Image: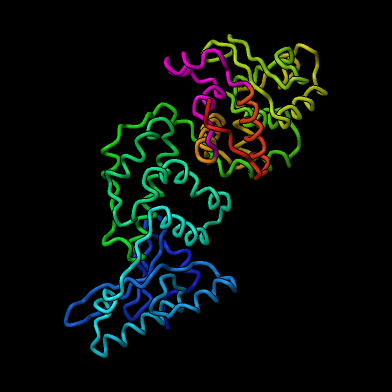
Amino acid sequence: MGKLTALKVKSAAEGRHADGDGLYLLVKESGARSWLLRIQSDGVRRDLGLGTAETGPRTKEAQASADSIPLLDRRSLTLSEARDKADAYKRLVKAGIDPVAERKKVPVAIPTFEKAARDCHAELKAGWRNKKHADGWLSSLASHIFPAIGDKPVDAITSIMVRDALAPIWLTIPETSRRALQRIGAVLDFAHIKGWRPSETSLKSVRKGLPRQPQADNHFAAMPYEDVPAYMAQLASADTTAGRDALQFTILNAVRSNETRFAAWPEFDLDKGMWTIPAARMKMKQVHIVPLAPAAIKILRRRFEARTSDDGLVFFSSPRKALSDMTMTKVMRDDGRDSVTVHGFRSAFTDWAAETTSIPKEVVDKALAHKLPDKVEAAYRRTDFLERRRALMTMWADYCAGVSNVVRLAASA
């Protein structure tokens, strides 16, 4: 009787875990799981890769597909199949047949990096609890990596290729680029386990070939954008308070908390869906126009019913007193979200736009009221992308509400 169980296969930490009789489960840092069999042939002890470890139950269709493949040819194995395959190989060894030499006689078709990534995603996602993370795992690769190396054979991918693919986004969208690097590593580990790459791959040298990423905003811990819809639903399901309304409004508009806290009714045109923030209240000391999504307008109309005057604050603790700078933070703490910051939702918005849309960075930066580089500012000085930002903020609000039928804005200006 083996030591491992199906639950242990799914939950085992990084490392090598023995099942018995030479069979091991290998768990990589990336989460990739595979089966190894330690054999001794012609006096030489070797580790033989059997295939990837399946962690979830199969559908009837998947089981039928697996049953159509001879056991020794299967590269994705349940615990019981791994034991059976290990027993079959041990019988070959006992009969004087070298299973490694036998396998080398059969040519292996090497897939492209993109095909390997999609196969890796299909097998790994069964063990992920967060469905939105599973759905979004490929997006950063599809947007930024596949165009550069997606059509290359996965066994030909080098650290230099990875560095060159990441270089265009390494400084502009650092969080997205770091996630992409981690996912590339997972794909290459998966390819090695599948027998598509001759050795394990270290990507530590990739970072050494790229400039140091900016650290200025690292203290603003961000909620992963995949988790934002669930948190917005949590906020909406609780009792309405000025603090909760302010936090939802801040997230929907990707603005700074102070811009929400001191918002006053004369700044808004609800019929046109416009919020004009005076230059004096902006970090860059320039007037900023925010196109409001219907969800944001709904919050404002609710607050309008509670107003004390037509020129007063929208969100207040008392009629003439703005919310404390800790009010929204306290809401998050009360909700069990004390590991992230309010400001971090701007980073979540940036990552969402970069990973799931093809919206130009200049439009996203304008939505965040970031100062554009001089050359970009000169090229676009005649427009503030208002209508494109309106579409962008509506897309973001739909995403926050869990609406999946989001379309992409064209990348052209």
Q: Which of 363 and 350 is in front in this view?
A: 363
Image quadrant assignment for residue 374: top left
Q: Is residue 406 left or right of residue 26?
A: right
* Residue at horizontal 44 percent and vertical 46 percent from the top: 141
Q: What stretch is highlighted in magenta?
A: 357-386
Residue 259 is one of the magenta-drawn residues: no
Instruction: Residue 129: name its quadrant.
Output: bottom right
Q: Which residue is drawn at 63% across and 39% down?
A: 334
The residue under the point 47% across, 42% down is 143
Residue 107 to residue 296: above or below: below
Q: Quadrant of the N terminus?
A: bottom left
* Visual colour scheme: rainbow
**Looking at the image, residue 393 lies above or below residue 224:** above
Give percent across and percent down for residue 396.
62, 35
Query: Residue 215 appears at what percent x and percent y?
Result: 38, 29
Asked whether 228 or 330 is in front, the reply is: 228
Residue at the left extreme? 43
Q: Is residue 366 magenta?
A: yes
Number of numbered discs on residues: 0
Q: Which residue lies furthest to the right in this view?
A: 305
282 and 157: which is toward the camera: 157
State whether residue 220 is above or below residue 104. above
Q: Residue 127 in the image: state x and y as whole percent.
A: 51, 61
